[in-house]
Each structure stands twice: as structure tokens, then as C-alpha cells.
Image (cartoon, grey):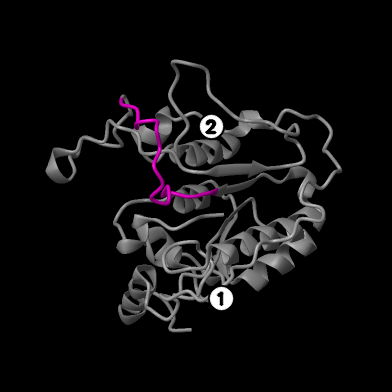
Amino acid sequence: MRGPGKEHEAHVQHPSIFGRLSDKGIDWSVYGYNRAPLTKANFPDTQQAGAQHFGRFIDFKHAAAGGSLPAFTLLEPAWKHDGNSQHPNDDVASGEQLVLDVYNPLRTGPDWAKTLLVITYDEHGGCYDHVPPPAGATPPSNQTGEAGFDFTRFGVRVPTVVVSPLIKLGTVLRVPDGSVPLDHTSVLKTIEQRWGVPPLTARDDAAPGIGGVLTLDKPRDDNPLDDVIVPVSKGDNPARAVTSHLEAVYNSLVAENLLPST
């Protein structure tokens, strides 16, 4: 499950993890919430992928309930100005409801015992973090970015939650001191390790995976979110009717015929 990010600002011309999975014959799907997913327009291999790889949130719920989810599934929130992505201008509480709405059909579905749910963001929300981004990251390539940025610095810390009945209750996943830190490419590395997929860049090749968090031989049968009530916002959101940045990006991709209009 994916949060908002800069990668939606333009479609890029390089391979993606979806193409890598297709090359290995591993099935995958991307689900938008109530519209076609933005990911479909991001990469050449997703633009060219068949319609069976894409759907809406209702399709995800049916697949989870029926045990027909593919090996790898990516979920996108609703990117509209009244959506649930927790990105400005969205109501943060709506995003909390989305997390619960994803968890419940997975937990009650027939494949829960072999499922790993990753809930992550690629922005830290603008909150102050007393830990500076570490250096020493492996650049994805030899290219240099804007203002000479060489991609050898990791980004700010972001929230990531991993959920599975094969994870011991209360686990906090950390890598050993002095090793490569976990970062967003750790999700890619985990997919690559699980299905023998070659890396996309030197960055994900060097990253640690998160598969080590699955330490239990027997799945747990408890429900940590039993009786959890999702918070509800009080008061009006003054920006609720304002077109969000991501909504404008979506509309531009529709105009380029890279995404359907509905």
C-alpha cells in the first residue's frame, strides 16, 4: 500500500518492478481507489501492460476475499481533493479509515497466513525530525541531479508499518549498526529476494530487505485492531474543495490519454 510521492509528477522512461515481475512470469496488480491508478501511466512497462493488471479498490476487496490476489499487489489511495491519501488537501482521518479497510479483507481472506502488508509513505509530513538524513547511500546510477545532487544521501525518516500473522507481536524492525539503512528501495529488494527478480538499480541492489521480519513458523490468530475505532475529523477543512497537486497531475495524464477519464 502506497502513500503520495513525487514520482507521480511525470511518467518516466525506465523499467519498473512490474516489468521485472512480468519478465519472471510473476503476476501483479495495481489497484486505484475509485479511479484508474496513477501507476499505470508512470512507466513504459505499466503503460503497455494488460488491463487485467489494474483495477479499483472494490476489485481488491473481492480478490482478497476470494483468495485470488496476485503475488504482488500495489494499492493507491484516492488522489482527489476530497480523497484519502493523507496528502494535502486530504482529511488525515480518511486515510486512517483506508488503512483499516485494507487490513480487514486481507485478515479475513483465505491467504492471510501467507500475506505481508506494507503500509509506507515517501514523505514525512513536514514534521521536524531530530535525526539528520545519513550519508553513504549507493547512487542508483552515475547521473547527477539538480544542483549537483549525487544521490549519496538517504532521505528523511518516514513511517512504515509491516503487518503479518508471521510477525511477532510488538516487533520493531532494525538493521544491525553499521549496515545499510532501510529505505524505500528495501521494498523493492524484498520483492527481488522473494521472487528472484534482478535489481532495477545499484540502489535497490545494495538495500536490505524486510523479509527477515517474518520470524514465526505458525501464524498468529489474534487481531490487534479488534474494537479499534477510526478517528473522525471535527470541523470543516477550508481547502477541501481546492484542487490538489496530485489531482492536477492526474488530470494532465488523462488529457495525454495515458489514463481513462473515469
Furthest toward the front, the residue is 235
Residue 197 seen by the camera: no
**141 shown above or below 44:** above
- Disc ID at residue 34: 1
What kind of residue is marked 1? Asn
Residue 140 image-quadrant placement = top left
How would you classify the magenta stretch by its main secondary structure? loop
Q: Secondary structure at mark 1?
A: loop
Where is residue 53? Give x, y as percent. 55, 65
For this rendering, which residue is in front, 13 or 164? 164
- Provide the residue span drawn in magenta: 120-135
Q: Is residue 10 left or right of residue 28?
A: left
The residue singled out by tag 2 in the image is 209
Amino acid on which the number 2 mark rests in the picture: Gly
User: Looking at this view, is 244 or 42 the one in front?
Assistant: 244
Q: CA distance from mark 2 to mark 1?
A: 31 Å
As helix, strand or loop, the secondary structure at mark 2 comes to: loop
